[in-house]
Amino acid sequence: MVFLSFEKFLDLGLDNKDFNKTRFTMCHKERQNISKVRLDSDSGCRYTITGDTLAFSHEERLGTRYIAALSMSYDVFLTIFDINNSIGLVSRFLKFEKEQQTLLKDHMKRFRRANLEARVIGMQNDEGVDTMNEVNSFIKASKLQVNEIDLFGNEFRNIAIDLKTGLTFDVLVENRQYKPGELINKATQEQVERESIRSIGAPIVFKG
């Protein structure tokens, strides 16, 4: 029996012209829920906006425990977690610009005895795969181990990564389970691009 890595599955998916037609998920452990109340009560939570590339370490006394990305739709949340040192890098983007890639590479050079896990989350059905091809090339060049893939679909995502464990969570923004269809994304990519500069952690609200 041949076991394929997540990296290989990502390669195969990107070679398939129908890859972006439906939600594609792979993970070693199913994501659990975490309430926004818990995130907000934890002094070590940082919210991201589209365009952020951030590096944090988790220390019991001072460090950031969670990094969250709310109201994700057409954007991508790329996380890189150093198991040995509980250091996390995150980049949230609509397009994976060279500046962001260089910044991530510069941070990774500072890791000692690094054992790096990558997680790639985001995008919507029928969205072009050029951005994911850029991400995949970066993952290969950086020799990252992919531990979670959650791409496409038709819903908003609210995600947090725990820098103590490296695991991701689905954030319950209203501190309750969502009803079926409640997170369906009705915004266009153009709307999201216009609204990409916004208050930290604030959900996008589209009217009309």
Image (spheres, grey):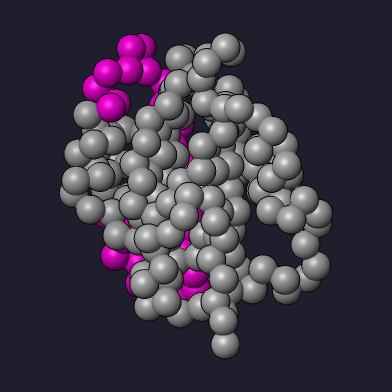
Report which quarter residue 130 is drawn in. bottom left
Left/right of residue 188 with respect to residue 153 in the rendered view: left
Foreground residue, 113 or 77?
A: 77
- Which residue occupies 72% across, 37% down? 38
**What range is drawn magenta here?**
107-134
Look at the picture and state if 21 lies above or below 85.
below
- Which residue occupies 24% across, 43% down? 101
Left/right of residue 49 with respect to residue 22 in the rendered view: left
- Which residue occupies 57% across, 12% down? 61
Look at the picture and state if 114 lies above or below 19.
above
Report which quarter residue 103 is drawn in. top left
Q: Position of residue 93 (x, y in %)?
A: 36, 55
Foreground residue, 8 or 92?
A: 92
Whether residue 23 is visible to the viewer of this picture, yes or no, is: no
Q: Position of residue 199 (x, y in %)?
A: 46, 55
Q: Position of residue 84 (x, y in %)?
A: 47, 14
Quadrant (top left/top right/bottom left/bottom right) for the N terminus? top right
Foreground residue, 158 or 196?
A: 196
